[in-house]
Structure formats: structure tokens, C-alpha cells
Amino acid sequence: MNLILRQLNENDEQAFLEGAKEWGGESPHWYSFIWKEGMAFKDMLEILHKENEGIDLAPDRVPHTMLYGFLDSKIVGRVSVRHELNDYLRKRGGHIGYSVAKRFRNKGYATEMVRQAIEFCKNRGMKSIMITCADNNIPSWKIIERFGGTLQDQVWDEEESEMLRRYWITI
Ligand SMILES: CC(C)(COP(=O)(O)OP(=O)(O)OC[C@H]1O[C@@H](n2cnc3c(N)ncnc32)[C@H](O)[C@@H]1OP(=O)(O)O)[C@@H](O)C(=O)NCCC(=O)NCCS
């Protein structure tokens, strides 16, 4: 599969805006935590850069790298790699969070993005990563278990009113 998972650069504006437009109905944070209609692309890149470097972070944020999955010139989804955990992420969120646009689902793209994200973590020197997902999110926990995820526990998430699975993957 020729899917490439990488950070955005200044040449990706068109692909990014197209991806945002075609994200379709789902919560926009699954595409980007930052971008809002009308925002300059270069301003978003600047924020992503700062978040990656841990500069000017809000107290509840940890440094993270946002990686986008490119198939040819189209963005199919994204993975956020948190460099460390805080209390919130330890409860829900973990080290990596991923999503694929609806029209690209069930084609193996999330599996490939997570495979490359694990490589990214390994290259950063991370030894194990936590991933959480809703108990009823079958595609997500299939992916986690495919990469050797060990179930730590299942907990009730008050915020989303759902059971949550918390896994660890040794890398
Ligand atoms: C979860 C999500 C990323 C999966 O993306 P995807 O590209 O469709 O996943 P894949 O195609 O790689 O499929 C992963 C596995 O789930 C299975 N699967 C996919 N859709 C499925 C469905 N609707 N029901 C059951 N299994 C399904 C696939 O067959 C595959 O299993 P396999 O490897 O045994 O064949 C996508 O549904 C999504 O973006 N959801 C919203 C955001 C989200 O929930 N993110 C995860 C939170 S951590």
C-alpha cells in the first residue's frame, strides 16, 4: 500500500483544505484539533510546529506530532502521536489517536497508518504506547490487537458515557 504518513508542510494546503471539506459531518477534531474555516494554513502549520516542540502549550496539553495519511495526493486520515501522557490521556486518549475519513474506511488505511505511527514512536525512542478506544469501536480495537495490544482494563468513561478499553503496545 502506498500510503504515506507524515507531517504537513507548506505544499499541502490544497490537499488539507480538500480533506477538510470532504471530512463530512463528523466531529472536526477527528480531522484537526486546530484548523477552523477561514484560518490561514500557514498559521495552523505554525501552531502544529509549536505543539510538536512543546512551545506555549496550554496547561492541559502535552507535546504531540500530528501525522496525516496521504494516498497519492489525498488525505485519508490522521494520527496524533502524544510524546507523553498526562492524567487526562492516561484515562482516555493514550499516546496515539487516529481517524480515517468516512469515504475511505474499511480499506485497511487505519491499520497502515497505525503501523507507521508505531514506527514513528519507535524512532522517537518510545518503548511502549497506550491506546484507548470505546468498547463498541470494533475496527479500532481490532487494529490495536493486531499490533499486539494488551488490554489493561475496561473503564466507564463519564465524559462520553461509554465503556472504554485501555491497551498497551510494547514496541
Ligand atoms: C476506527 C477507524 C480509524 C478505522 O478506520 P478504517 O480505515 O476503516 O480501519 P481498517 O480498514 O484498517 O480496518 C480495521 C479493522 O476493522 C475492521 N472493520 C472495519 N470496519 C468495520 C466495521 N464497520 N465493523 C466491523 N469491523 C470493521 C476491518 O475489517 C479491519 O479488521 P481486519 O484487519 O481483521 O480485517 C475509523 O472507523 C474512524 O476514523 N472512526 C472514527 C474515529 C475513531 O473512532 N478513531 C479511533 C479512536 S482511538
Image (cartoon, rainbow, N blue to C red):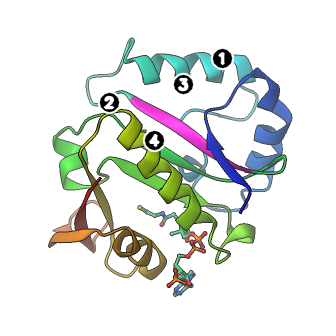
Cα–Cα span, label 1 and label 2: 19 Å
Task: Identify the residue position indicated by label 3 in the image.
Answer: 48
Q: Which residues are magenta?
A: 64-70
Front disc: 4 or 1: 4
Lower position in the chain sequence, tag 4 or tag 3: 3
- Residue 143 picture location, percent across and down: 44, 72
- In this rendering, the count of numbered labels is 4
* Disc 4 residue type (three-letter): Phe
Q: How far apart are the alpha carbons under marks 4 and 3?
A: 17 Å
Q: Secondary structure at mark 1?
A: helix
Asked whether residue 65 is drawn in magenta, I would say: yes
Tell me which label, 4 or 1, sits earlier in the chain: 1
Earlier residue among tags 1 and 2: 1
Does residue 6 appear anywhere in the picture?
yes
Label 2: element kind: loop
* Residue wearing tag 4: 120
Q: Position of residue 49 (x, y in %)?
A: 53, 19
Residue 88: x and y in percent read 22, 45
Tell me the SS state at disc 4.
helix
Q: Is residue 155 visible?
A: no
The residue that mark 2 highlights is: 61
Q: For marks 3 and 1, give the one nearer the viewer.
A: 3
Badge 1 crowding class, 10 Å Cα cut-off, few under 14, some 14 to 19, many 20 or more, is few
Between marks 3 and 1, how big is the CA–CA gap? 9 Å
**Any mark on residue 65, and which?**
none
Give 56 or 162, whichever is nearer the viewer: 56
Q: Quadrant of residue 11?
A: top right
